[in-house]
Amino acid sequence: MKNTYLPLLLFVASITTVFSQQLVLKKGEIIDSLPVQDSTNTTYSLYLPTNFNTETKWPLMVVFDMDGKEKQAMSMFVVAAEKEGYILASPKMIDSLSLTKNVLASSRVVEKVANLFPVDPNRVYTAGAAKAGRFASLIPVLMDGVKGVMTIGASLANRELLNIKEPFHFIGMVNKNDFNYTSMLTDAKLLDKLKFPNQVLLFDANGEWPGVDYIQKGMQLFTLDAMGRSLIPKDSIFISSSFKKDLDKVNQLKNRGDLLWAEQYLTEMMSIYGAHKNLDSLRNVQKELRRDKQYREMNRAENAVFLKESILKEDFQYYMEEDFYTHNFNNLGWWTYQISELQKYINSAKPLEQQMGHRLLGFVNALAEDNIDLVLSEAALDEDALAFLYMLKTILEPDNFEYYLNTISLSAKNEDFGTSLFYLEEVLKKGFKDKEKLYGLEGTALLRITPEFNELVAKYLDDARYLIEKN
């Protein structure tokens, strides 16, 4: 039977103590809540591949999650890390609102893992999805020694911080329904101009996560890049196998008629395999594809969609900012109409319009959530602006009960019982069933003893807590 326990003893010693704590770490399993043992009480999760040994230098991927679920986030990378031979570490974020604290915590975790294990200093990478991906993209800029970033559904957090003297390898994964898709294409153009190695991997729009194969592909790209830069020995079998799989992917895309994706994939292949083999035949394939009439038509159609999308995004950004600053509740009807128009795109028979509709709806949702965070972060809370944004979110996400409840609570706090009762009935119509949560909503003490409140609860949830008879 293979021994999966790490055959070394790790001693964690404190300057102020005269004894050491002996730790035995198991390979092939996520170990969470490991202490960094510093003044900040930083902890992290760790994964060591089952074939880990101390004679080899290992690449390290630091996986981020901004919601305190670092172990769950890391679990999405475990299968790929096991296959590709990566150590995983994931810091416990101390404060989701403090960039400085989180960067320092990340730095301490990288230093700790590098001190404990034989980490290759030229192969330290970061990764994350959504907002954690944006945070991951900042780490190579703010912390020395990080050579690459893998983001899922997240564009670069700050393009202005990029330093051409300290390039890093960027791998972005996104589906065409994600509003980050166009931003990521813009990032790729900028990174090309700055001569940062980069690849954008598209995946089918059937979920927010690309799947294990894509995570594994991202790790393979980092490995191929390291071989191309002579940071590790070249493995001709690994290179040939990867190239063949990528070429098969291009042929699959061409055969199903997705010529835009096929051409984009060829571009990414040339950016990674140029250091390993002659690509003249691949360039000929790409030239032939670009001359294809169907490809040119599809390319023109996508560019037209991108132009229309950019105009609509500018409009949405302008009107949302204008509406919540001026407390323009009368414009909620306009927003309802706009969302109905986006639904038409989503239900269109044309794939490009469907993708644009999904991206725009995602963009407006993200914009509203960013503005909610902005209002909540201000010292003087603008409750009317917050109320507008909560109401807008009930239009954008009609099946998300949170924003109905927030609207009920905030309106009741300001004794606007008419608005509270309206949104109470709306959320009950949508199927909200948690009676205890309704009667526990902050700021509703006076509202929930009114006959109107209890009549609505009784109507949709069979009975109410307070049965008050009208005279």
Image (spheres, grey):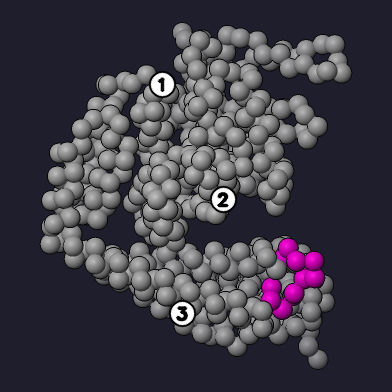
Which residue bears the numbered disc 1? 232
Give the CA distance from mark 3 to mark 1.
Answer: 53 Å
Q: Which of marks 3 and 1 is in front?
A: 1
Give the CA distance from mark 3 to mark 2.
Answer: 35 Å
* Amino acid tagged 2: Leu
Q: Quadrant of residue 340?
A: bottom left
Which of 434/58 is in front? 58
Q: Determine whether 446 is above or below 40 in the image.
A: below
Query: Would residue 211 be visible to someone looking at this image?
Result: no
* Amino acid tagged 3: Gln
**Where is residue 189 shown, x and y percent of the image?**
38, 54
Number of other residues with Cα within 10 Å of mark 3, as a class: few under 14, some 14 to 19, many 20 or more: some
Q: Is residue 379 magenta?
A: yes
Q: Which of marks 3 and 1 is nearer the N terminus?
A: 1
Which of 158/205 is in front? 158
Give the side of residue 241 with respect to residue 131, left or right.
left
Number of other residues with Cα within 10 Å of mark 1, as a class: few under 14, some 14 to 19, many 20 or more: some
Looking at the rendered structure, the secondary structure element under dot 2 is helix
Q: Residue at x 49, y 44 (%)?
A: 164
- Quadrant location, the C terminus: bottom right
**Where is residue 357 shown, x and y percent of the image?**
39, 69
User: Which residues are the magenta region?
Assistant: 376-386
Q: Does the magenta stretch include residue 348?
A: no
Give the CA distance from mark 1 to mark 2.
Answer: 29 Å
Q: Which residue is drawn at 72% across and 27% down?
A: 35
Which of 256/308 is in front? 308
Give the side of residue 304 with respect to residue 409, left or right.
left
Which residue bears the numbered disc 3? 338
